[in-house]
Image (cartoon, rainbow, N blue to C red):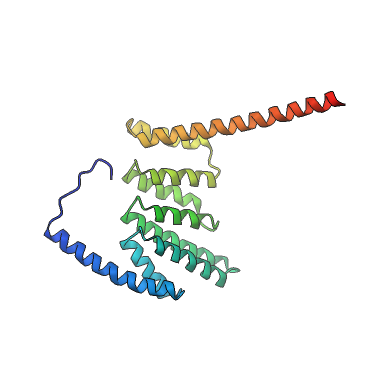
Amino acid sequence: MHGRPRKAAGQEDAAASAAKAEKLRALQSQFLSNHHQNIYTKEAIELSAKLLEINPESYTAWNYRKLAVEYALTQSDSDHDAVKSVLDEELRVVENALRQNFKSYGAWHHRRWVLRKGHSSVEKELRLLDKFQNADPRNFHAWNYRRFVAELMNRSEEDELKYTQNLIDKNFSNYSAWHNRRCDYYYSYVTAAKVYNFFCTLIMKSINDVLVD
């Protein structure tokens, strides 16, 4: 996280790292075998989740899980509860990965992909983001994801501005909150400008039609 010095690695840390690397190699070997053979059994999918808990930056594992989800959805397309169960499990895996690494591009991207499927609780995402942003207020991945969630919810710009204002009131030096606030103002300005230009164009067209007649 920002502003926190790293501790020098000791012998115990080196031994732990070696054990982790060995476990990772074994998982990767079995995972790649499953991936290449298009195996989407419960055991194979659970193994990919374990791999991602250790290494959330494994883009191949995230892509494998997308394929596994699509396969599962074709098997339960007409069963709403089954579809929701599959997608909820993906959100759980992503959350575990993010707890290991808040800044995992692959994890945040996969979470967006799941939410776009449209079967998950968007409101729950804001509560989860509150936890992550309390732990690391300057995580730009979380802020970008928040704007994505706010758009999915059709959350008003006023509500988002109030949210950032509360954070700024707690910590005036929260640069990320200030940045997000500027983004909200910018998008509000751009939207207003587009509406204004649309009506100006419409009015001018109407005037031209009258003059031609």
> Residue sitting at 28 percent across and 42 percent down?
2
Residue at the outermost right position: 213
Which of the image's four quarters has the N terminus? top left
Percent coordinates x, y for residue 209 in the rendering: 82, 28
Left or right of 37 on screen, residue 18 = left
> Residue sitting at 45 percent across and 57 percent down?
110
Left or right of 37 on screen, residue 54 = left
> Residue sitting at 15 percent across and 54 percent down?
9
Query: Total label count?
Result: 0
Residue at the outermost left position: 11
Front-lying residue, 170 or 97: 97
Does the rendering let one see residue 76? no
Percent coordinates x, y for residue 197 in the rendering: 65, 29
Name above or below for residue 12 compared with residue 132.
below
Does the rendering let one see residue 136? yes
Percent coordinates x, y for residue 15 in the rendering: 16, 64
> Residue sitting at 30 percent across and 62 percent down?
54
Which of the image's four quarters has the C terminus? top right
Percent coordinates x, y for residue 178 in the rendering: 40, 32
Front-lying residue, 204 or 86: 204
Left or right of 197 on screen, residue 180 = left
Name above or below for residue 194 compared with residue 33.
above
Front-lying residue, 96 or 67: 67
Q: In which image quadrant can residue 56 be found?
A: bottom left
